[in-house]
């Protein structure tokens, strides 16, 4: 089963996603750094995760309509995908 979770609380988002990103810190240093710097007053437009069968597999945050940042786990490592202006999140 796939579950999509949207966050409104920066502290809760950090609590849930930082351990996931730290597992592959070398690959996740940019999104990890951005998320660790988040303050409640500069909350992203959208923060979310995707879990598959109870396991976190995707983290995403969105600051403006023009930018989206995703971090997914694939196999042993992960890969980051950044979308620019005009792209859509699915």
Image: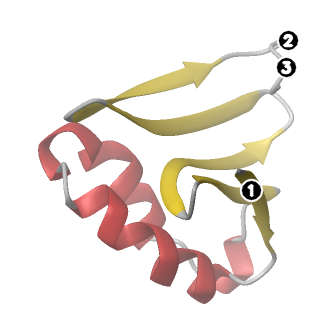
SS for dot 1: strand
Looking at the rendered structure, which numbered label has been put on residue 3?
Answer: 1
Quarter-of-image position of residue 32: bottom left
- Label 2: which residue? 86
Nearest to N terminus: mark 1 or mark 3: 1
| Residue 9 x, y percent position in the rendering | 73, 84
Left or right of 6: which side holds 20? left
**Spatial separation of the CA atoms under disc 2 and disc 1:** 26 Å
Front residue of 12 and 64? 12
Residue 88, compared with residue 3, is above or below; it is: above
SS for dot 3: loop
Nearest to N terminus: mark 2 or mark 1: 1
In front of the other: label 1 or label 3?
1
Looking at the rendered structure, which numbered label has been put on residue 88?
Answer: 3
Q: How many marks?
A: 3
In front of the other: label 2 or label 1?
1
Question: Cβ–Cβ below 8 Å for labels 1 and 3?
Answer: no
Residue occupying the far left of the picture: 26
| Residue 29 x, y percent position in the rendering | 24, 48
The residue depicted at 21 percent of the width and 37 percent of the height is 27
Front residue of 55 and 88? 55
């Amino acid at each position: 089963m796939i579950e999509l979770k949207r966050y409104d609380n920066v502290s809760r988002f950090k609590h849930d996603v930082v351990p996931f990103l730290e597992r592959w810190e070398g690959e996740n240093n940019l999104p990890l750094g951005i998320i660790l710097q988040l303050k409640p007053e500069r909350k992203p437009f959208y923060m979310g995760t995707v879990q598959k069968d109870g396991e976190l597999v995707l983290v995403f945050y969105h600051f403006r309509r023009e930018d989206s940042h995703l971090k997914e786990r694939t196999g042993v490592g992960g890969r980051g995908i950044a979308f620019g202006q005009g792209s859509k999140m699915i």
